[in-house]
Structure formats: C-alpha cells, structure tokens
Amino acid sequence: MDSESWGAFDELLVALREVAGRFAGDEWGITAPDDQAEALRVLLHHVATGVDTQFEQDPAHPTFRPLVTPWRKTLGDNPDARYHDAPIDPAGVYRIRGRTGGAVYVSFTVEAGAGDGGFSTGTVGTLNDDGFDVAADGSFELWLGGPPRERGWLPLDPTASRVTVRHYWEDVVGPNRPPVADLALKIELVEGKVDSQPAAPTDATVSEALRRLARYVRSRTLEAMPPPGQGEPATFVSRIPHEFPPPVPPGEHGLAAADAAYSMAPYLLGPDEALVVDARWPTCRFANVVLWNRQLQTFDYLRAPVGLNRAQAVADADGRIQVVIAHEDPGVPNWLSTEGRPFGLVFWRFILAEGPIDTPVARVVPFAEITPP
C-alpha cells in the first residue's frame, strides 16, 4: 500500500477527521448532541456532493451534474430551484444546450478559481435568459469562450474553472419540478486544446481526485463558514436576530446569482413564540423566502412548508405579505415551520427586481396571540 492514491486516501481521512472535529465541535459553537449530529450530517452531504461533482471530472469531456437535491444540500439551496454545474477550461470553447423546463428564470454564471476543488473566488461571467434565444419548446443554445457573439455567449476569463446553471420555478407546485432529464442539459468542448483525463483511472488521476475532494470538503466547511462571530459578513447578512438588512445584490461573491438581491437574518424563538415578518413582493422575475439551518441548508421542504415563493404566498393587491414563522401551524396563511428548531436563518431572495425593494420587518409575538382568520 505504497501507491500515491493510498497516500491521498489517507490524507482524505485525516482531513475528514479534522473537519469533523472542528466543524461539529466547540470551535464552531456546536455542543448539543443534536447539533453535533446535524453538523456531521452536513459534512457527509458535502462529501456526497464532492464525489458527485468533483471526484470524476474532465474539462475536455464535461457533464452537468446536480449541485443539490432535496436530500443532499449544500451552501444555500432552494426548494424552488435546481442547480447544476460542470468543469470548464478557459482554453476551450464550449457549446451548451438545454431546456428551460417551464422555469421563470434561467441563468449561467462562470466561477473563477475553483478548478482544484476550492471555493469559487468570484463570478467572472453572467448570462440569463434575456441574453439567449429560447424556442417555443423551451430549448436553447449558448456558447462559452471563442469569438464574441451578439447573443447567447459568455467570454471565458483566464481564471474560469466551472459553469453553474440555475433554473427557478415560481408556482404552487413546490419541489415537484420537472425531471432532470427534461432539462436536457448538455455541454461539449468544440474547440481548443484542453488536457483530457485518460478513460481508465490511474494512480495519478485517482490521487489527484482524492486530494481535490478533500479540498472541496474543507473549502465548504472550515473556509466557507468561519466560527460564529468571526470574519466579516456579506452586506446582505445580519448577525442580529430578527433584523433584516436592506436587500442588496451579492456583487462578485462566489456562487451567487448576480441578478439577485438578498437579505438574511437569524431567528431565535422560545417554545411559545412566533416570528411575524411583514414584507412586500417587488416587481421582479422571481422572489421567495426560505428557512435554513446554521450550515445554510434548507429545512426539510418535502415534509413541511419551510419556504414560500410569490405564487404560494397569500398577498394583498400591493404584494404585501405577512409570514409567520412558528414551531407549529397557527392556522393562518404563509406559515413556515421551524421544525421545532429554536434557531435558524431566514433568507429572502429577489431576482431581477425593478425599483426599490422594501426591507422585511420582523417582530416576535406570543404564539397564543396569532389568531386564525
């Protein structure tokens, strides 16, 4: 057992032990058994995502793979969306084909500096469905790299490493979206000298993949989410429970939708309390509100209402809504379930908003004071 791949496998085990001990331990403020269990669950979700999207990859023969599923979640997933990504090389020219699948918004972002499994250092290209042609059946085609084109084209920055696809649906159906096959996503290298992996695994390629997987897991845990209170939060993130910052675009923040405006704040509720949030849907392409755990995973939207998009929420004629976040159903519209969790994150997302976006305003009230209509 003196091969390079055995050495890389041992390194992976050491890395997982370190990440588990820190990310699911005192350093990250995780002390209660249930919180430790959830942090370890999150770690395994990252491992599973890394195996799916990072372990077997070849920019010369790329394929789009799902970044999240309802049972495998990482870094801010969304019950109203599907996310796919693929590795690319800035030396190549790629053709992408697919379908919208009835989505109200489809976009492509090019991520920089993530070719080795690390976290994206920034977004270096964005194109939404306003910038490419969509046929009557929802099919489309676009290009990455190569000579400029009037529509359906993104240049490839020298740091380009991956391309991410976002499909967003805004309807009352919930998470029962079209099968992935219906999106027919395909990416192919059509020009350019790009190094290709051999068809059969070798000691060198497997050891490289194992180290890439270890970097991926570390970058999504210890590096992407520092211990509580450390690091400078993004401008759309509040550390004060129930106080939302004004919704703002993420800028060049890695793995963020450049067309979006975000606002996030934690909630902290006692067993007999509820959080009432007043907000207004702006004129936009898409909007929703979602509950996350501290590791940025949605709560279980297959079992309970933990998110609302505009089609699902009950609003007045001006788009104003009142969201009630509580441990149990109070019998009013727009209830979001905490799953009994005293702590969580409330995340608002607005895509291609026109004009100003009202900042959500929250207040804690006794659960007994919420009166059904």
Image: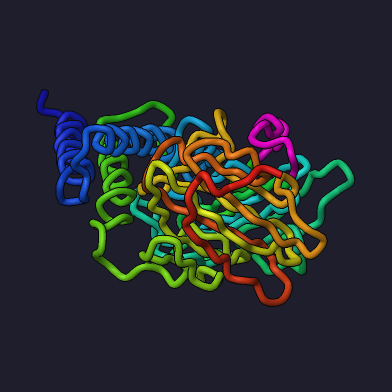
Q: Tell me the residue at 71%/62% (across/down).
A: 320
Q: Tell me the residue at 48%/61% (across/down).
A: 264
Residue at the limit of the structure toward the left, as seen here: 2
Residue 195 seen in render: no
Left-right relation of 303 to 168: left
Render colour scheme? rainbow
Residue 323 higher or lower than 31, as above or below: below
User: In this figure, what is the number of numbered marks?
Assistant: 0
Residue 30 in picture, x, y percent from top left: 22, 44
Looking at the magenta stretch, what is its main secondary structure? loop
Residue 6 higher or lower than 21, as above or below: above
Front residue of this view, candidates 322 and 80:
322
Left-right relation of 295 to 218: right
Q: Quadrant of the C terminus?
A: top right
Asked if the stretch drawn in magenta spans residue 296, the answer is: no
Q: Tell me the residue at 66%/67% (across/down).
A: 147
Q: What stretch is highlighted in magenta?
A: 171-185
